Amino acid sequence: AVVSTQSTGRQFRTSSCWEAYPESGPVLRELRRRGVGVVVTSDFDEGLVSLVKELDMPVEGVVVSYVEGVTKPELLALVQDRYGIEMHVGDSERRDYQGASDLQGVTPVLLDRTGKQEGKDGVVSDLNG
Protein backbone atom coordinates (compact mmCIF):
# COMPACT_ATOMS: atom_id res chain seq x y z
CA ALA A 1 0.00 0.00 0.00
CA VAL A 2 3.03 2.28 0.15
CA VAL A 3 5.90 3.09 -2.14
CA SER A 4 9.35 4.43 -1.29
CA THR A 5 10.20 7.80 -2.76
CA GLN A 6 13.72 7.86 -1.26
CA SER A 7 15.93 5.30 0.38
CA THR A 8 18.73 6.95 2.32
CA GLY A 9 19.88 6.33 5.87
CA ARG A 10 17.56 7.00 8.81
CA GLN A 11 14.97 8.72 6.65
CA PHE A 12 14.12 5.34 5.17
CA ARG A 13 12.36 4.52 8.45
CA THR A 14 10.23 7.68 8.52
CA SER A 15 7.18 8.71 6.55
CA SER A 16 9.18 11.53 4.90
CA CYS A 17 10.48 9.08 2.27
CA TRP A 18 7.30 7.07 1.78
CA GLU A 19 3.86 7.85 0.50
CA ALA A 20 0.75 5.74 0.30
CA TYR A 21 -0.60 4.82 -3.10
CA PRO A 22 -3.60 7.10 -3.82
CA GLU A 23 -6.24 4.41 -3.31
CA SER A 24 -4.72 2.99 -0.09
CA GLY A 25 -6.43 5.27 2.43
CA PRO A 26 -9.91 5.15 0.88
CA VAL A 27 -9.78 1.37 0.40
CA LEU A 28 -8.54 0.74 3.95
CA ARG A 29 -11.19 3.05 5.42
CA GLU A 30 -13.93 1.34 3.40
CA LEU A 31 -12.76 -2.08 4.54
CA ARG A 32 -12.81 -0.91 8.15
CA ARG A 33 -16.31 0.57 7.67
CA ARG A 34 -17.44 -2.85 6.45
CA GLY A 35 -15.89 -4.54 9.47
CA VAL A 36 -13.03 -6.14 7.56
CA GLY A 37 -9.77 -6.24 9.47
CA VAL A 38 -6.50 -5.56 7.64
CA VAL A 39 -3.09 -6.72 8.79
CA VAL A 40 0.11 -5.42 7.19
CA THR A 41 2.52 -8.32 6.65
CA SER A 42 6.03 -7.56 5.45
CA ASP A 43 9.60 -8.75 5.17
CA PHE A 44 10.63 -5.42 6.71
CA ASP A 45 12.04 -4.51 10.10
CA GLU A 46 10.36 -3.20 13.25
CA GLY A 47 10.39 0.35 11.86
CA LEU A 48 7.35 -0.53 9.75
CA VAL A 49 5.10 -0.43 12.83
CA SER A 50 5.75 3.27 13.43
CA LEU A 51 5.77 4.01 9.69
CA VAL A 52 2.25 2.58 9.31
CA LYS A 53 1.12 4.76 12.22
CA GLU A 54 2.77 7.87 10.73
CA LEU A 55 1.03 7.22 7.41
CA ASP A 56 -2.27 6.95 9.31
CA MET A 57 -3.15 3.58 7.83
CA PRO A 58 -6.22 2.10 9.57
CA VAL A 59 -5.06 -1.49 10.15
CA GLU A 60 -5.58 -4.10 12.87
CA GLY A 61 -1.95 -5.05 13.11
CA VAL A 62 1.52 -5.01 11.61
CA VAL A 63 3.55 -8.22 11.44
CA VAL A 64 7.16 -8.01 10.25
CA SER A 65 9.68 -10.73 9.55
CA TYR A 66 12.46 -9.03 11.55
CA VAL A 67 10.43 -9.29 14.76
CA GLU A 68 8.93 -12.73 14.08
CA GLY A 69 12.13 -14.39 12.87
CA VAL A 70 10.60 -15.80 9.67
CA THR A 71 10.05 -14.38 6.19
CA LYS A 72 7.29 -14.81 3.66
CA PRO A 73 5.84 -17.23 2.77
CA GLU A 74 6.30 -18.75 6.26
CA LEU A 75 5.27 -15.41 7.80
CA LEU A 76 1.85 -15.74 6.16
CA ALA A 77 1.11 -18.95 8.09
CA LEU A 78 1.95 -17.15 11.33
CA VAL A 79 -0.40 -14.29 10.40
CA GLN A 80 -3.14 -16.76 9.48
CA ASP A 81 -2.82 -18.45 12.89
CA ARG A 82 -2.76 -15.13 14.76
CA TYR A 83 -5.44 -13.20 12.85
CA GLY A 84 -7.41 -15.82 10.89
CA ILE A 85 -6.84 -14.15 7.53
CA GLU A 86 -9.09 -15.13 4.63
CA MET A 87 -7.34 -13.15 1.86
CA HIS A 88 -3.79 -12.03 1.25
CA VAL A 89 -2.88 -9.26 -1.20
CA GLY A 90 0.77 -8.90 -2.10
CA ASP A 91 3.09 -7.89 -4.92
CA SER A 92 5.41 -10.90 -5.04
CA GLU A 93 4.17 -13.81 -7.11
CA ARG A 94 6.30 -16.34 -5.20
CA ARG A 95 6.33 -15.00 -1.64
CA ASP A 96 2.83 -13.51 -1.55
CA TYR A 97 0.60 -15.13 -4.16
CA GLN A 98 2.03 -18.65 -4.06
CA GLY A 99 2.62 -18.43 -0.31
CA ALA A 100 -1.04 -17.57 0.31
CA SER A 101 -2.15 -20.24 -2.20
CA ASP A 102 -0.46 -22.83 -0.01
CA LEU A 103 -2.59 -21.86 3.02
CA GLN A 104 -5.97 -23.53 3.40
CA GLY A 105 -8.85 -21.05 3.43
CA VAL A 106 -6.79 -18.08 2.19
CA THR A 107 -7.57 -16.44 -1.15
CA PRO A 108 -4.39 -15.12 -2.79
CA VAL A 109 -4.42 -11.86 -4.75
CA LEU A 110 -1.41 -10.63 -6.70
CA LEU A 111 -1.08 -6.85 -6.84
CA ASP A 112 0.62 -6.13 -10.17
CA ARG A 113 0.97 -2.40 -10.77
CA THR A 114 3.14 -3.05 -13.86
CA GLY A 115 0.38 -4.68 -15.92
CA LYS A 116 2.62 -7.65 -16.81
CA GLN A 117 0.16 -10.14 -15.26
CA GLU A 118 -2.99 -8.42 -16.58
CA GLY A 119 -5.92 -10.71 -17.29
CA LYS A 120 -4.76 -13.58 -15.09
CA ASP A 121 -7.04 -14.92 -12.37
CA GLY A 122 -6.35 -13.46 -8.94
CA VAL A 123 -4.42 -10.45 -10.28
CA VAL A 124 -5.36 -6.80 -9.67
CA SER A 125 -3.64 -3.62 -10.84
CA ASP A 126 -4.46 -1.55 -7.74
CA LEU A 127 -6.22 -1.95 -4.40
CA ASN A 128 -9.58 -1.02 -5.91
CA GLY A 129 -9.48 -4.54 -7.34
Image (cartoon, helix red, strand yellow):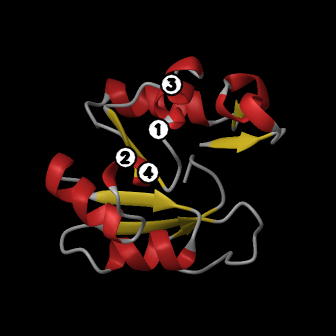
Q: How far apart are marks 4 and 2 (CA)?
A: 4 Å
Label 4 – label 3 distance at C-alpha: 14 Å
Discs 2/3, front:
2
Q: Badges 2 and 1: C-beta atoms under 8 Å apart? A: yes
As measured in the structure, the alpha-carbon distance from the residue carrying label 2 to the one carrying label 1 is: 6 Å
Which residue is the site of mark 1? 46
Contact between labelled residues 2 and 4, with CB atoms less than 8 Å apart: yes
The residue that appears at 57% across and 46% down in the rendered structure is 128
Side of 20 relative to 116 (left or right): left
Q: What element carries label 4?
A: helix
Residue 67 shows which numbered tag?
2
Whether residues under marks 4 and 1 lie with C-beta atoms below 8 angstroms apart, the answer is yes
The picture places residue 46, in percent across and down from the top left corner, at: 47, 38
Q: Which residue is drawn at 26% across and 54% down?
A: 79
Which quadrant is home to the N terminus? Answer: top right
The image position of residue 9, as x and y in percent, is 78, 36
Residues at marks 4 and 1, CA–CA distance in whole angstroms: 6 Å
Which residue is disc 3 drawn over? Answer: 50
Numbered mark located on residue 34 in the image: none
